Image (spheres, grey):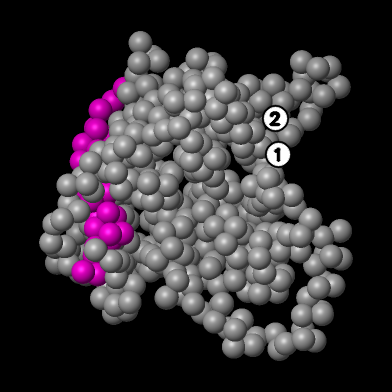
Amino acid sequence: MSNEISTAPKKEQVKKEPLFSPKNKKLLYDPMNDSNPITVQVLGICSALAVTVKMQPSIVMALAVMVVTAFSSLIISIIRNIIPNRIRIIVQLTVVAAMVILVDQFLKAFVYDVSKQLSVFVGLIITNCIVMGRLEAFAMANKPWPSFIDGIGNGLGYGVILVIVSMIRELLGSGELMGFRIIPESVYEMGYFNNGLIIMPPMALIIVGIIIWVQRSRNRKLIEAK
Amino acid sequence: MEHVNLFIKAVFIENMIFAYFLGMCSYLAISKTVKSAVGLGMAVIFVLTVSVPICYLLEKYVLKAGALAWLSSDFASVDLSFLSFIMFIATIASIVQLVEMVVEKFAPALYATLGIFLPLIAVNCSILGGALFMQEREYATLGEATVFAIGSGVGWFLAIVALSAIREKIRYSNIPDPLRGLGITFIITGLMAIAFMSFMGIKL
């Protein structure tokens, strides 16, 4: 059902303007830096911190969030004109929850180990503020194709931070990347230790704090007013 | 005694914010002043205490594999657990709506303080997180689930009030420009979480 609806407006869109017009490209690239969902818009932090001990689960998580954000933006944007304003939150939650159930079942079927590691955090994509925030701020007021791009862009922006944080934590915390050993055994024999603190939850917060620091000192227009 | 242990565990050792980062978004956004932090914290305790037990009953009598056996023996093999996300979020959203209306009608003073925060809570991860943890950890009785919910709420309350008090104090401190606002808040939360890690050794 939703497939039929979703293809029709997209085709119209293609005729009117190129698929990746400069405006749409901006939607895709902006969330990587200038309007990054985590470090600038402060959305979706809960899951960003909890799943970043290892790289593999964080990549899976980032993909899951991207899929959910993109497709729920698409669906909400298609039906945006028929949603009564007063119950829009519940309608949005229902669409998002349905998408999350699909993703969750998919993960359980194909990458069961990772799905176990992510535990409740797949379910928590429903209340992930990135999804709700983009639905409220963008998809409710824009056409389906830009909304879809916006969803992908924000999912990517979220994923970039997730990958950076998890790379730092996995490298320093267990000397591996994606499960492969990076720091050779001989270094350990010389007296090197894995940093046990960095795989503890608090360090995720501090790493994100430092990422914000670095980003804002490079991009000074993001600095908050006093 | 077991309930007291569970409560202390939920407040300190498995604190919603410092151990699981649930509800971080509103935690960061609404912790600028102590007054609003207290308001939001109270609302979270309230909604958690009401909605987690209801989700527990839903889980036990509708969603779990074989849970429908009380209806008739034909349903004993039905497993609706894949519906739990949508059921929980619908429950939470409608409870928040209901609580808002009840509070508005019977306690206008409380409504004036909580007013704007109540609708926000429907999308606060800590509520759905509480419900999902309750499901994952399989609490044995309704009492345990309720105590866990109250404990998580109190832990969240403590965390947001503490952070807002610190943020009020550091408002006029000399912080490096790029770190001002969000950056320093993250680092403060990280340090607070390290402090809370000292509870980890406690075996209850």
Q: Are marks 1 and 2 in contact (CB under 8 Å)?
A: yes
Q: Counting residues from the N terminus, which is met first, the one under dot 1 or under dot 2?
A: 2
Amino acid of disc 2: Leu
Q: Which residues are magenta?
A: B177-204
Q: Is residue A186 left or right of residue B146?
A: left
Q: How many marks?
A: 2
Element on which disc 2 rests? helix
x, y percentage for residue B8? 32, 23
Residue at (38% x, 14% y) in the render = B2
Residue B138, visible in the rendered structure: no
- The quarter of the rendered structure image containing the N terminus of chain A is bottom right
Q: In the rendering, which numbered label is found on residue B83?
A: 1
Report whether mark 1 lies on the same chain as mark 2.
yes
Q: Alpha carbon of mark 1 to alpha carbon of mark 2: how far?
A: 7 Å
Q: Is residue A21 left or right of residue B110?
A: right
Q: Quadrant of residue A79?
A: bottom right
Residue at (13% x, 61% y) in the render = B174
What subunit carries mark 2?
B
Is B185 part of what is drawn in magenta?
Answer: yes
Q: Quadrant of residue A204?
A: bottom left
Element on which disc 1 rests? helix
What subunit carries mark 1?
B
Is A216 placed above or below B90 here?
A: below
x, y percentage for residue B181? 28, 59
Is B202 part of what is drawn in magenta?
Answer: yes
Disc 1 residue crowd, few under 14, some 14–19, many 20+, Cα 10 Å: some
State the residue in front, B204 or A19: A19
Q: Quadrant of residue A146?
A: bottom right
Residue at (58% x, 46% y) in the render = A123
Q: Which residue is mark 2?
A: B63
Amino acid of disc 1: Leu
Residue A87, visible in the rendered structure: yes
